[in-house]
Image: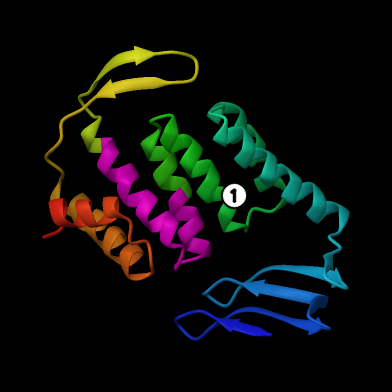
Amino acid sequence: SKEYYRNGKIHQEGIYINGKEDGIWKEWYSSGKLKREILFNNGAAKPTKEQEKFFKLMSNGIEVSAEGNYKSAIKIFDKGIEIDSQYSDLYFHRGTAFFMQFKFDEAIEDYNKALDLEPLYKEALSNRAFARLRKYEFANSRTLSKSSEVTIMASKDQVDIPTDELEKICIDLTKGYELGDKSAMIEEYIERYCK
């Protein structure tokens, strides 16, 4: 089996035997760089101990982040990055944890890293655009309510965004949309800021 990216580069390659993955399966970034390879036996993944530790960390970080414990999630993702600093998903998820803490510069930096590794990462493109937008929307905001888990802030609906930043936002929103991130929110922001 072979799957390809829109740009013609190979995305994934492996062998099926009797309808089940078998042998080494490889996955690449759209740049052509190898992302990962995993051994399968009769449909069951047989990761190395290091791969097992890595994916357990990433899964745990995603779970902790989903529970709203972003600070702990970031620490978990940091440990994952120590094991494999070339895995785009870790930067994406850590960036999202930063985003949820209103740390927009850190979020943008992580989305940049994810996109350096995987230029066609549509969710990272959209999230980077929103991190840039929120950075300006919340620049002069005030905190309405804050607890250890949730912060509620007031912001303006329409804000002044420097032209060069707005251009970056629109490029990301449009590219993310073209790659398939067609949520109503993306369409709304393209209409509001990019027309």
Q: Between residues 42 and 107, which one lies in front from this camera angle?
A: 42
Which image quarter holds the N terminus?
bottom right
Count of number-bearing discs: 1
Read off the residue under disc 1.
90
Q: Secondary structure at mark 1?
A: helix
Q: Residue furthest front?
A: 18
Left or right: 192 as drawn, with respect to 47: left
Snapshot quadrant of residue 46 = bottom right
Colour mapping used in the image: rainbow
Residue ID at (57%, 78%): 32
Coordinates of residue 3 in the picture (x, y in percent): 59, 82
The secondary structure that dominates the magenta segment is helix
| Up/down of 141 relative to 9, above or below | above
Snapshot quadrant of residue 6 = bottom left
For mark 1, does the 10 Å Cα neighbourhood hold few (<14), some (14 to 19), or many (20 or more) residues?
many
Does 143 appear in magenta? no
Residue ID at (52%, 74%): 30
Q: Between residues 187 and 131, which one lies in front from this camera angle?
A: 187
Residue type (three-letter) at the residue carrying disc 1:
Leu
Residue ID at (32%, 70%): 178
Which image quarter holds the C terminus?
bottom left
Left or right: 117 as drawn, with respect to 159: right
Snapshot quadrant of residue 119 = bottom left
| Up/down of 81 relative to 34, above or below | above
Left or right: 105 as drawn, with respect to 4: left
Coordinates of residue 138 in the picture (x, y in percent): 25, 30
Q: Which residues are magenta?
A: 111-135
Q: Between residues 17 and 92, which one lies in front from this camera angle?
A: 17
Coordinates of residue 159 in the picture (x, y in percent): 13, 38
Does 117 appear in magenta? yes
Residue ID at (57%, 71%): 29
Q: Between residues 15 and 48, which one lies in front from this camera angle?
A: 15
